[in-house]
Image (spheres, helix red, strand yellow):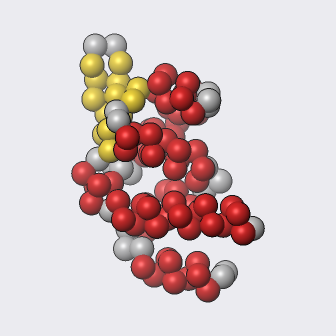
Amino acid sequence: MKTSNIHMIHRIKDKELYNMILGTNSAKTRILIIDEILKEPHNANQLAKKLKLDYKTIKYHMRVICKHQYATEEKFEKYTFYYPSDKLIKHIDEYIEIKEYYKNQIFEG
């Protein structure tokens, strides 16, 4: 494990957020989804079209993100919209650090 990785892990207090994103092969997808809901609320169809991902992929990742309470869902008529949760907003600096770390690993590795 690289020294920069060890230092970053120690700075991150929200290990659940770290593991939910970097602890899987789905980091890119989860980062893309979270970034979109941070911009504005979306439903699964909107996310799928915007990110060019399968609807079922979006639904799966949103279930995981909501289960860990980093997004909330709100039903409006026949649609479910996803919003960033208070928990995500509270840890936004750590989320940004995790995202930057991931991007650096992609370009360096």
Q: State the image coordinates of residue 85 (x, y, percent, origin top left).
A: 29, 47
Q: Quadrant of residue 102?
A: bottom right
Q: Where, by quadrant of the figure, is residue 78 drawn?
A: top left
Residue at position x 37%, y 74% from top?
13
Spot occupied by residue 74 in the image (x, y as percentages of width and height): 27, 29
In front here: 64 or 88?
Answer: 88
* In this view, 35 is above or below 76: below
Write the residue at 66% across / 82% down: 2
Q: Nearer the viewer, residue 108 or 10?
A: 108
Residue 101 x %, y % = 56, 67
Q: Is residue 23 visible?
A: no
The answer to whether residue 97 is visible is yes
Q: In this picture, is 41 found above or below 30?
A: above
Please tell me in which quadrant of the rendered image residue 40 appears. Answer: top left
Quadrant occupied by the C terminus: bottom right
Query: Taking 88 as reference, is 29 left or right?
Result: right
Residue at 53% in and 33% down: 58
Q: In the image as oriented, which residue stretches furthest toward the top?
A: 78
Residue at 27% over, 19% down? 76
